Every structure is written in structure tokens, then in C-alpha cells.
Amino acid sequence: MSKSFRGGVHPLRHIGEGKPLTQASPVRAIVPDTVVIPVGMHLGAPSEPCVEKGQRVLMGEVIAKPVGGLGLPVHASVSGEVMFVETRQMLRAKPELCIGIQNDKLDEWVELHPMAPEQATPAEILSAVKNAGICGMGGAAFPTHIKLSIPEGKQADTVILNGAECEPYLTADHRLMLEHPDRIVGGLKLILRATGVKKGVIVIEKNKPDAILSLQKAVSGENDIQVLPLKTKYPQGSEKQIIAVVTGREVPRGKLPIDAGALVFNVSTTAAIYNAVALGKPLVERITTVTGCVVEPSNLLLRVGTRYEDAINACGGLRECARKVFAGGPMTGLCAADLESSTTKATNGIIAFDEQQAKEMIESACIRCARCVSVCPIGLHPYLMRSDLDKHDLESAKKHGLLDCVLCGACSYICPARRYLTSSYKAAREELAAKARR
Ligand code: SF4
Ligand code: SF4
């Protein structure tokens, strides 16, 4: 059985969504000479640095402390000496505060406090997840301990693990599902205990039959957990679409998944939860797909704060055809100004595009064809929102659904005028979030 939702697109179906480049590439770890770690990697306010230049830090040591309700600690991803605490231009529009560390290659860890996962209480799980600095690793970067805390008066009956990985080119979650299904199932059991929810469903697109088999094997004998194959269609991995497909319930406009009685976690985030409890490890590394116009497209286990250039060089460097580098998938990712930017907890891909793909990113005027409307899985009018934003009318954009948009990128993909739709919504949402924080 496979399930799906209304709307959506099929990007790069003729080349297997670009995934064959790396889906058979086992994960290999690289160890950079330096890391540059932004302190604002999660959705809330940036963390506050608590180290200074010249100080020696251990791997896993807290180097920036949480600020505010959505705050998270940031940890050193290598042991070594702090080179700087200063602002650097990363992917966002404005420079960000970063901590640079020279790696001494000793990988000397702080003292870790692992627990027997089957004995961890809900409070201990929440505390371990919070202290490990875990946020959504599928791209949203929402603090995970908050998602695990069901607000009073709300209820959930299903935890959904998102292994859809519907973005073209990306295979990081795919490799995790093949290589560490035990960590994913172990993490899911911890989520079920922490939230008191009884039922777990792991969803995977049908273009990953080996991952479906791997997880089916890992959950055999678990009566409360099932693996559900989904049709291959973009954005199958979007929270609202997954909830509708799995539970048959809609997330009401302007509401959260919990309002539809469900919680959704990415499979990488779930494995990080397992690592935080069973190994006591903070989130300092993740699998990232490095692909496109690179010599050896690969899946790499990267320390948080690895420069794109180091990741690309570990794949043999850029091929001559490379013109633009994207962080994240081609549908929802952001174009990097240079290779000095570094990876965060949410960087699931680094993709180098060639001339043709780069040209396809040059926008022209809207021709009012409404193709964007026909593919929007939420039923919005993307061209109207963009027109509002061109006039800097945020209130009108909100009325047209700016806050309901799941930033899936389907409208940008289908638009014949190559309008920068999703990136304009993303920027507007960041502006609204910054206003709210102020
Ligand atoms: S408007 Fe938002 S939800 Fe709709 S297709 Fe565009 S990015 Fe996706
Ligand atoms: S698909 Fe592009 S050109 Fe067509 S209406 Fe939407 S924004 Fe305009």
C-alpha cells in the first residue's frame, strides 16, 4: 500500500530525483582542521557564547548558552583552541555570530552521561534532548524538547517519523535508515515514552525500497510501530501532508501538528535523540549529502561547523561545470555566496549546480498562468503572496496564507517565469520572527 496527498510535483523524475548519484554511497566521516560554528542554528534566539579566544575546549563542551524560551545550547564539535568569537557572513542575509575552533584532532570529549534507554523516564529523556541541543534536522531547526512537551489540554495519538526525504538529490536520511535503523527505532521508542503516545508510524517514499525493508526488519515484533510506504511525490515529507496521509486529519489553518493529534519527527532527529540518551552525546555531527558537480558525490558524516569548501574537497572538489552551490535541497535550500559558509545542525545537503541549472534560477515577470496554484499542497495562491511581498505588504501576505505556507518549494519549481517564490516567503517569515523576538 502507498499513500499520497493532493497537489505536488515530480521534480527530476527522469533521473530518479537525482538520488542515484549518492544513494549507494556509504557514509564516511571527515575531520576538518577547523570548524566555524554559528550560534544561531535553531529557530529561537541565537545562543550566547560562553568561551573566549585562546580557550581550549573539549568535544561536546557547551560553547554558547541558550537564550529565551526557544533557546538551545551549542556544543564544540571538535576539541581544540577557540580561534575567534566574531560575526561572519553565512547563509542568512545578515552576518551571524560564530565561534571558530582549531581542531587538535584529539577528539577529547567532555564527560558524557549515558543512560540505559529502556530505563530513562520521560523527564530524563526531555532533559537529555534539551541539554544535547537537538533541533529539527530535516531543515526546520525547531527545538526538539519543545516538540516533545505536549501542552496541557492537547493530545496526540500518533508519532510519525519522517523518512520520506522527498527533496531531490538528498540521500542522507536514506543512508541513515540503511546503516542505523536500530538508532531510529530506539529513538522512536524514547519519543513514545516521553510523550505518552502509544502508536508510531515510520513513513518512507517508495523510491527507497531497501530503506523500507531495513526499517520493517528493525520494527519486527514491535506491535505499536509500523512502516508505511508513501508514493514518491514532492512535498511528501512536509509535516501537514504526512499527517493528512497517515491520520486522515488536517492540521487547521494557523495551527500546529499537535492540533491534529499528531507529532512529526525527522528520522535523523530521532537518531540524535537516541544518541543523546543512550550515549549521552550532544548533537555535534550529522550526515550530509554532498553532490551535483563534485568529483565524487558522497554522504559525509560532518562535524557541525564544517566549511562547505572542506566538505566539497573531501569529495574530490568541484567539477569544472560547477556554477552555484546550494545548501539544503534544491527545492527548499539557499544559494551560498561562497564556500566559506559552514554546516549547521540542519544542513542535510550541499549541492553544486551546473550552468544550465544555474540559468534556470534567473527570474522574470509573472505571467499569471496559475501553475503555482495548481501544485500548492496547501491550496494557496503563491503568486498573490509574492505580489504582496513585492509591495512589502506583510499583512496582506499573511491574509493570503504566508504563515500557512510549508515552504515546500513546489510553486517555485513549477513556475515557468522562475519566480523566487519560496525564498521570498522564507525571508518574510524570518522578518516576522525577528520582529516577534524584538
Ligand atoms: S506557497 Fe508555500 S506551500 Fe504552497 S507550493 Fe509554494 S512553498 Fe509550497
Ligand atoms: S507559476 Fe509563476 S508565472 Fe505562473 S502565476 Fe505562478 S508565479 Fe506567476
Image (cartoon, rainbow, N blue to C red):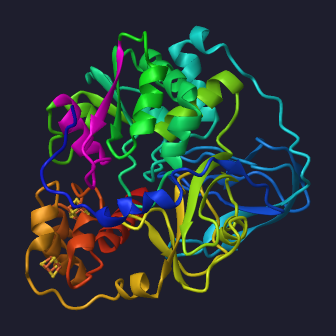
Q: Residue at x 59, y 72 (%)?
A: 90
Q: Position of residue 302 (x, y in %)?
A: 68, 53
Taking depth in this image into account, of 106 and 318 the one nearest to the observer is 318
Where does the N terminus fall, quadrant-wise? Answer: top left
Q: Residue at x 60, y 40 (%)?
A: 133
Q: Quadrant of residue 357?
A: bottom left
Q: Position of residue 61 (x, y in %)?
A: 78, 42
Residue 44 lies in the magenta stretch? no
Q: How many numbered marks are there? A: 0
Which span of residues is magenta-colored? 224-247
In the picture shown, does residue 47 fall above or below 225? below
- Residue 83 in view of the camera: yes
Q: Quadrant of residue 124?
A: top right
In the picture shown, does residue 180 fall above or below 39? above
Taking depth in this image into account, of 218 and 60 the one nearest to the observer is 218
Seen in the image, is 40 located left or right of residue 306?
A: left
Q: Position of residue 52 (x, y in %)?
A: 83, 58
Seen in the image, is 8 located left or right of residue 93?
A: left
Q: Residue furthest bottom?
A: 364
Residue 244 lies in the magenta stretch? yes
In the picture shown, does residue 398 fall above or below 159? below
Task: Find ligand 2 in the image and state its quadrant.
Answer: bottom left
Where does the C terminus fall, quadrant-wise? Answer: bottom left
